[in-house]
Image: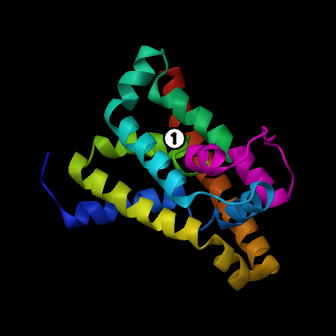
Amino acid sequence: MFEIDFKEILTVGMVLFAVIDIVGSIPIIVDLRTKHGHIESEKASIVAGIIMIVFLFIGEEFLKIIGIDVHSFAVAGSFVLFFIALEMILGIRIYRDEESSSASIVPIAFPLIAGAGTMTTLLSLRSEFHTINILIAILLNLILVYIVLKLSSKLEQLLGKNGLGVIRKAFGVVLLAIAVKLFAANVKGLFV
């Protein structure tokens, strides 16, 4: 359990970085900050970290208890990612906000950071890598998430409205591709 391997940490960290896609989420974060006001960066990062770590250890068992296999969970997650991607690309609004004073927990901590894609990725990483290296990679990604959340207003000013629009659409296409890949990789498992 305590075999620290920097190559594993780097690999897991890069995979999680791609799946969490906090840089691509900047337009969403800016939009949520505009709608809800201040985003509590610390709270969002800590809650997302707790969700990821808990799911790393008990996720598969929890899914078994409620009668859901990993493939079904991944396919459901692919649909969520698909609709978020459509919102980003087409500039439409599918997700209906519930009345809340803050967006720090929902939808930032969950499902934006620690969503279905992140959780299914953690389950697959657990079968390939040492747990300590996954935990370190999660921590490093959470530090990056915290920095991006904290600097979201400065990043908005730096990129401007047009820059954010371009990033939003580009990362929307990337997110759409991740959703399709997640769906394709897991839909076969539903019929086995």
Residue at 79% from the left image edge and 60% from the top image edge: 89
Is 71 placed left or right of 125 in the picture? Answer: right
156, 132: nearer the viewer: 156
Q: In this view, does 46 lie above or below 59?
A: below
* Residue 114 placement (x, y as % from top left): 51, 46
Q: How crowded is mark 1: few (under 14 residues within 10 Å), some or many (20 or more)?
A: few
Q: In this view, does 148 lie above or below 91?
A: below
Is residue 89 in the magenta section?
yes
Amino acid type indicated by mark 1 = Ala
Residue 127 visible to the viewer? yes
Q: What stretch is highlighted in magenta?
A: 82-111
Residue at 67% from the left image edge and 49% from the top image edge: 103
* Residue 149 placement (x, y as % from top left): 58, 65
* Residue 139 placement (x, y as % from top left): 35, 58
Residue 130 visible to the viewer? no
136, 185: nearer the viewer: 136
Q: In this view, does 86 lie above or below 171?
A: above
Q: In this view, does 42 lie above or below 156?
A: above
What residue would you read off at disc 1? 185
Specify the color scheme. rainbow
* Residue 166 placement (x, y as % from top left): 76, 74
Residue at 28% from the left image edge and 40% from the top image edge: 127
Is 109 placed left or right of 2 in the picture? Answer: right
Q: How many marks?
A: 1
Q: Is mark 1 on a helix, strand or loop?
A: helix
Is residue 78 in the magenta section?
no
Is 128 placed left or right of 94 in the picture? Answer: left
Q: Quarter of the image for the N terminus: give it.
A: top left
Where on the picture, by quarter, is residue 61?
top left
65, 101: nearer the viewer: 101
Residue at 57% from the left image edge and 43% from the top image edge: 110
